[in-house]
Image (tube, rainbow, N blue to C red):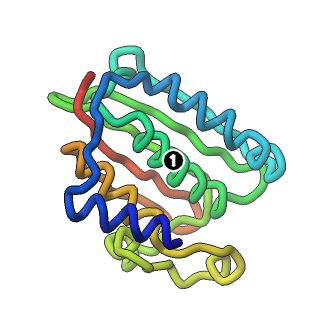
């Protein structure tokens, strides 16, 4: 928690420079999948990657982008029941690449969708009462995405799942 707070503070103050380089989304997704494979298997969750060839390269800080994926997939794992599915997709927009991380989890109530990106905010639901968390992951993800010139948002249907979408500059 202390490290996440320090990272948030450093990014907000501009003390962290994003070392932007051309990054391969397929490569990053594969690395994160490998890192989380034990937890995915233990929870009986399926991770599917559908990175479009024309939307595979982005301009980003590779380490920070990995953190974004780890946070988003980690959250999806917490809130998706066994036999559920998590999908990573990408597509090109006019000037950016849009990446979507979708799950078949419990979903997020409409009243909480903006607040989830605020520090320490956690949706009041049964899962959050059982699962540990700081409420800092999504605020850190938002800062990282915005530091790259992108934006992040969520769409969700309670009982069906959520899709976290973010944009990054094309590589």
**Image position of 134 with respect to 100: above or below:** below
Give the x, y percent position of residue 109. Answer: 45, 74
Furthest-left residue in this view: 95
Give the x, y percent position of residue 95. Answer: 16, 29
Residue marked by disc 1:
102
CA neighbours of label 1 inside 10 A, class few (<14), some (14 to 19), many (20+)? many
Answer left or right for 155 relative to 93. right
- Which residue is found at the position 36% from the left and 68% from the top? 117
- Which residue is found at the position 24% from the left and 26% from the top? 170
**Image position of 71 with respect to 18: above or below:** below
Give the x, y percent position of residue 130. Answer: 71, 79
Furthest-top residue in this view: 53
Position of the C terminus, as image quadrant, is: top left
Q: Tag 1's secondary structure?
A: strand
- Which residue is found at the position 55% from the left and 58% from the top? 161
Furthest-right residue in this view: 42
Answer left or right for 40 relative to 105. right
- Choose top left, top right, bottom left or bottom right for residue 141: bottom left
Answer left or right for 61 relative to 50. left
Q: Looking at the image, which is closer to me, 77 or 18?
A: 18
**Image position of 116 with respect to 68: above or below:** below
């Amino acid at each position: 928690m202390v490290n996440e707070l320090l990272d948030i503070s450093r990014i907000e103050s501009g003390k962290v420079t994003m070392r932007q380089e051309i990054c391969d989304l397929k490569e990053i997704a594969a690395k994160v999948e490998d890192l989380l494979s034990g937890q995915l298997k233990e929870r009986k969750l399926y991770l599917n990657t559908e990175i479009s060839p024309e939307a595979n390269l982005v301009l980003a800080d590779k380490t920070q982008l990995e953190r974004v994926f780890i946070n988003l997939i980690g959250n999806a794992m917490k809130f998706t029941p066994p036999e559920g599915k998590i999908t990573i997709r990408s597509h090109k927009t006019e000037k950016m690449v849009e990446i979507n991380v979708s799950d078949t989890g419990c979903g997020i109530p409409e009243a909480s969708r903006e607040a989830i990106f605020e520090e320490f905010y956690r949706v009041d639901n049964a899962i959050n009462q059982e699962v540990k968390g700081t409420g800092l992951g999504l605020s850190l993800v938002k800062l990282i995405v915005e530091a790259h010139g992108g934006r992040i948002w969520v769409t969700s249907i309670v009982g069906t799942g959520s899709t976290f979408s973010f944009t990054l500059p094309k590589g």
